[in-house]
Image: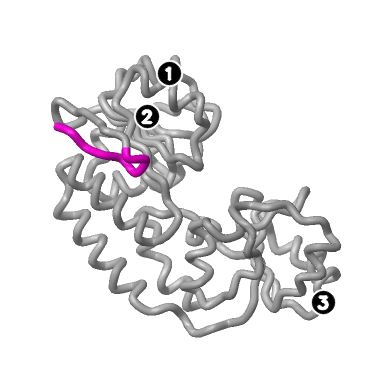
Amino acid sequence: MEYFDQLKRRIFISHPPQRIVSLVPSQTELLVDLGLEERIVGVTKFCVHPRILRKSKTIVGGTKNYRIDVIDSLQPDLIIGNKEENEQSGIEELMEKYPVWMSDIYNLKDSLEMIGRLGRMLGANIKAEEIIKHLNSDFALPSPKKGSAIYLIWKDPIMVAGVDTFINEMLGFAGFENLIQTSRYPQFSIEEFVDLNPEHLLLSSEPFPFKEAHIHYFQTLLPKAKIRVVDGEIFSWYGTRLLKAKSYLESL
């Protein structure tokens, strides 16, 4: 069978995949929720949902530094990756050996498309369509406007989420106006950061593990801002973690 991934690459699969390696935590969780846990043979150390998975599956490394030799030992018949999260040279090496299906996610539409395509390719289209229907309902209307915001993903140097990111999409649904209008994940000096003077400062729990203790430091820089630590998985995971997003975003 011939399929297309989100990089518009042709993927040829002769039979329904039974030995899947997932290199993306949010897509690993999606595979489980599609009822495909038994077919997963390899995951990354960051595939933390469901937590039991890392005890029952082979860890192939991280999302950037995965071990090709471990993946080879698993003899996968499908590898699932993501353009942003996975390291390019390693992915290209795997593509020479195995069918590799790549996602490329910028917004909710891309996420729903990814869920649908994986569902059809893996014979789980009925469950995938149920998830898509649920998410379309959840995200039919954005939350009420809350004001301007900056979303931090790293502390030293200060790195923030700009446009052309899935995080930016989720900020909009949560009712925040993202003040960062440059692309992707730019770095800012302390002075540039303070000059933006957001009404809200959101400290993500990942990839940098911001904690409540960091709030005091940033409050000294932005005394008028409302500052909170937010669940980074809700804002950046684009699989079935989104099923938990509506109630969480409304709670903000």
Residue type (three-letter) at the residue carrying disc 1: Val
What's the magenta bit mostly, secondary-structure-wise? loop
Instruction: Count neighbours of disc 1 (C-alpha within 10 A) and say few if under 14, some if 14 to 19, many if 20 or more.
Output: some
Instruction: Compute the Cα span from label 3 to label 1.
Output: 50 Å
Q: Residue at position x 64%, y 54% from top?
A: 153
Mark nearer the N terminus (3 vs 1) = 1
Mark nearer the N terminus (2 vs 3) = 2
x and y percentages locating residue 154 in the rendered image: 69, 51
Task: Tell me if label 2 and label 1 are in contact, CB under 8 Å.
Answer: yes
Q: Is residue 192 left or right of residue 69?
A: right
The N terminus sits in image quarter: top left
The residue to which callout 2 is attached is 42
Residue type (three-letter) at the residue carrying disc 3: Pro
The residue to which callout 3 is attached is 223
Residue type (three-letter) at the residue carrying disc 2: Gly
Q: Quadrant of residue 246?
A: bottom left
Mark nearer the N terminus (2 vs 1) = 2
Instruction: Compute the Cα span from label 2 to label 1.
Output: 9 Å
Task: Tell me if label 3 and label 1 are in contact, CB under 8 Å.
Answer: no
x and y percentages locating residue 24 in the rendered image: 43, 40
Seen from the viewer's position, the closer of residues 34 and 79 is: 79
Q: Is residue 4 magenta?
A: yes
The residue to which callout 1 is attached is 70
x and y percentages locating residue 179 in the rendered image: 65, 70
Q: Is residue 112 magenta?
A: no
Q: Which residues are magenta?
A: 1-8
Instruction: Count neighbours of disc 3 (C-alpha within 10 A) and say few if under 14, some if 14 to 19, many if 20 or more.
Output: few
Q: Residue at position x 26%, y 39% from top?
A: 4
Q: Is residue 39 left or right of residue 217?
A: left
Q: Is residue 182 left or right of residue 66?
A: right
